[in-house]
Image (cartoon, coloured by chain):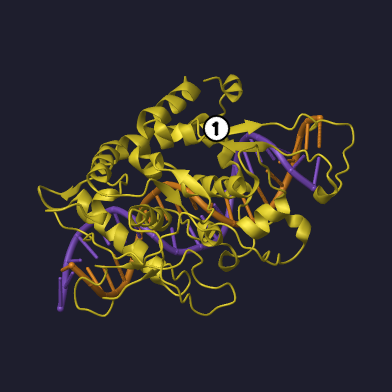
Chain colours: A yellow, B purple, C orange
Amino acid sequence: MIVFADLLPVSEGERKRYEARRTKLEKSEDEVGRACEKFAEIETGKLLRVRSEFMFRAEPAELAGDPSDRRLPPQQDRPPATRLPSPRGIALKAYLTALFVVQSRTPGTYPGNTLPLNNVDTVSWVDLIATPSQLSRKGDRNYVTVRDKKVRQLHSALDRLSGDAFQLVHLPNRNKGRGKYEGFQLLHERGAPYGGGDNPDRYMVPSDQEHLPWLPAGLFLNGWIHLLEDTEIGFLLMLAWLHARFGAQPVFVASDIRLRQFGVGKDAYEAHRMLNRFGLVDVEEDPNRHLEDSRLTGYNEGTMPKLHRFELRREGFNEQAVPKIRSAIERRLR
DNA sequence: GGACTAGTTTTGTTACGCAG
DNA sequence: CTGCGTAACAAAACTAGTCC
């Protein structure tokens, strides 16, 4: 694959970011492989379908302060897909993973949760996640295993997902002395209402008639979910929504909609470059971008915007994430 | 106005050890 | 298995530039 950005020299900061990412890849690698094997042992959906409310809010969020700042609306005003990301949390990944697993059930039903959280005798939720966690030991005893760390990360993610701020998960055993996370139940993708209040609906497997944004099963089966950053997943979900709305053609978003309805800020928007390197997104520059006219007229006038256009490369997910990401990084650092 | 880059600050999860 | 306090840390968020 030819990536023209590869011809530009690598700056020091960029080199550092790529090296950090490679280190993380190396730490995660084995776990990713194991998770892929476990996915193969259970029933999952044929692809990941996500209801619109998860990544898009129909009613644009208010922007505080000077609108020309192009700042993101505050966390609580963004849709779940862009509110969930956190420095080292796995809440977004855990929720999407649960959706994917549960979508193997009959459409139109409220799916039960049949997997244990952590049981060595059978495939468990903890087997389906992979993180860069390493075995740590003090002297030669008293060590914390990778599995223990993953269980904690999962607990923390479920705490966050079930909190008032999100309401994407219900913990029926919350008040039990032990096993408070066992049997967690999914709630509707909209999560907590923007104005406050409760999310009353349990998660229902979408019917085949519902026309929903979707991502390929390879996101999970080939290990991408563990290795993409939350911002990159958020960007992919935005593209999936745009394709659901506008069909299989290059899509673009005006910044006002990107910020107020998708909650995708400048940094998350930059994710497109990495995703392009990984072969997951095609990027097309607007041919009219360098027109003399520097004044921008409204997007609704049918004028050509000077925006990049994107297209999901869904076939990209058919590749194994680990070697693909590694080669993209190597190619850049060479 | 938008794409893009670099550098800095903020954020809040995670790691960790230990205790119950 | 669960809870707690602390510190480390990575990613997000922000600031401030350039260029067209």
Q: Residue A181: horizontal and vertical position, in percent? A: 27, 68
Above or below: residue A51 compared with residue A194: above
Q: Is residue A290 left or right of residue A255?
A: right
In front of the other: C11 or A4: A4
The quarter holding residue A117 reads: bottom left
- Mark yes or no: residue A13 visible: no
In front of the other: A207 or A117: A207
Q: Residue A328: horizontal and vertical position, in percent? A: 46, 27
The quarter holding residue C14 reads: bottom right
Q: Residue A89: horizontal and vertical position, in percent? A: 40, 56
Above or below: residue A78 compared with residue A236: below
Secondary structure at badge 1 equals helix
- Mark yes or no: residue A97 visible: yes
Q: Specify the amino acid type for callout 1.
A: Asn
In front of the other: A292 or A149: A292
Residue that lies at the very extreme toward the front in this rendered image? A209
Q: Residues within 10 Å of mark 1 (few under 14, many from 20)?
A: some
Q: Chain of mark 1?
A: A
Residue wearing tag 1: A276
Q: Is residue A119 left or right of residue A181?
A: left
Q: Residue A250: horizontal and vertical position, in percent? A: 65, 37
User: Number of numbered discs present?
Assistant: 1
**Residue at point 41% right, 28% down?**
A324
**Residue at point 30% right, 63% down?**
A155
